Amino acid sequence: MLRVLVIAFVWIAVAYYLYSPLPDNIGEPWKVRLILAATKIVNHAVQFGAYVGYDSGINITRKLLPIVFRLAAYEDYANELQIDSAIYDGIPVRIYRPKSVLPEELLPGLVYYHGGGWQIFDIDNYDKILQKLSKEGRMVVVAVEYRLSPEYPFPVPVQDCIRATRYFMQNAAAVGADPTAIGVAGDSAGGNLAAAVSYDLSYGHREKHPIRFQALVYPMLQAFSFRTPAYLQNEGVIQGHTSGLVFVGCWVTYLMGYHDIDISQVARNQHTSTSMKNSEVGRSVHHEHLPEKYHKYTSDESQSTYNESLAGMFQEALLNPLYCPLMASDVSKMPPTLVVVAEFDVLRDDGLLYAKKLVDAGVSVQTIHLHDGFHAVFSYTRLKIGRDLVADFIKYANDKLRS
């Protein structure tokens, strides 16, 4: 009897972790479910570890979640690359350069900022995808090891990225990169940092040679409204990848560092005042700027309540382009831009709204809409959608850097 109970328990546990409901058009569903199962196991381990006092939730997450990335990305080109570590204006970086090119040949350069909600992940976790970009794109890739929140809240991470990027632009030839052919890129929170760096280089610290492009992969671009159609439509659609509260928590921690704020209030947009919601800048995140098919996923914000104390904490940051790049009053000087959005992602509308704003300002924009995609697929090269996206990314980068 005990053996039967054990076997039954094991089967139930396997079924629980392996089965996740998915939208009908998700490709390679069982590969996706394996990735989601690993994510679910990590999330439960984090909760248990924090509950028993092993460590804080953020520290356990930093130790365990990278396992999922390592399982989902498998290609290794280390033997075909020269990989070096360096310090750029006080900021650690890792430099990738193909060995197949002559030492004196100057290659295009790409500065990459990793994702992770400004709280988790590092260059090591992104090593495989960075190798792939350098080897298959035949370019020098510089990955920035910016400091993380909550230990180092805004603006420290973005300032780290600006400093390292400017140093590279000024000294690119020293590592075999062409200073006239440099782009910046990032995914998720890294997409936010790429857009913020681009804004700074376009409106603040103007370098001798402007960056050729910015590539933003499912970027986090605004904390003004967490009631966009994408947040309302996609909550929980992909288990472990589309929790709006997780992203809200990342935004709050990025700004506040360690805090005791009730993020559920922020998720209900109680951090934005009524006057801001009804202002021109508030209208910039309105669903009317999105494709009509998303208009049914709406929430009337014009008369919603707000927490005055909470709104006071956020008001200045919400309009700061280095924190919320989408809210910049002028984007006409921004470089050519690639925006990648995933249909089943609460961040989808951030990218769509930003792309429209750039187009309206006369900026060259290419949008890749992954209609069968979800958050983090850029790093999941075991999936066809991930490999195809990386190939499209590299094509766009080379078109801009080698033209």
Image (cartoon, rainbow, N blue to C red):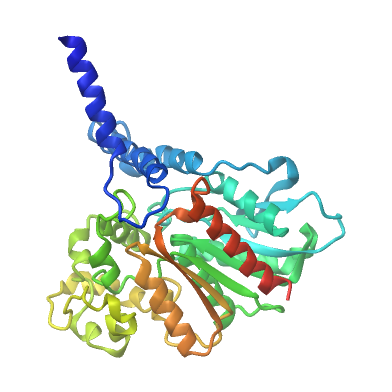
Pick the front one: 401 or 189: 401
Residue 383, image x, y percentages: 49, 48
Position of the C terminus by quadrant: bottom right
Pick the front one: 168 or 182: 182
Instruction: Note whether 163 is above or below 87 in the view shown.
Output: below
Q: Which residue is drawn at 64% across and 55% down?
A: 133
Quadrant in the rendering for residue 327 = bottom left
Instruction: Note whether 81 is above or below 372 in the view shown.
Output: above
- 165 left or right, relative to 246: right
Pick the front one: 402 or 246: 402
Residue 194 shows up from this direction: yes
Residue 359, image x, y percentages: 48, 86
Residue 286 shows up from this direction: no
Instruction: Note whether 31 is above or below 384 in the view shown.
Output: above
For this orientation, the residue located farthest to the front is: 24
Q: Which residue is drawn at 30% across and 51% down?
A: 22
- 55 left or right, relative to 307: right
Residue 313, image x, y percentages: 27, 70
- 2 left or right, relative to 74: left
Residue 374, image x, y percentages: 39, 57
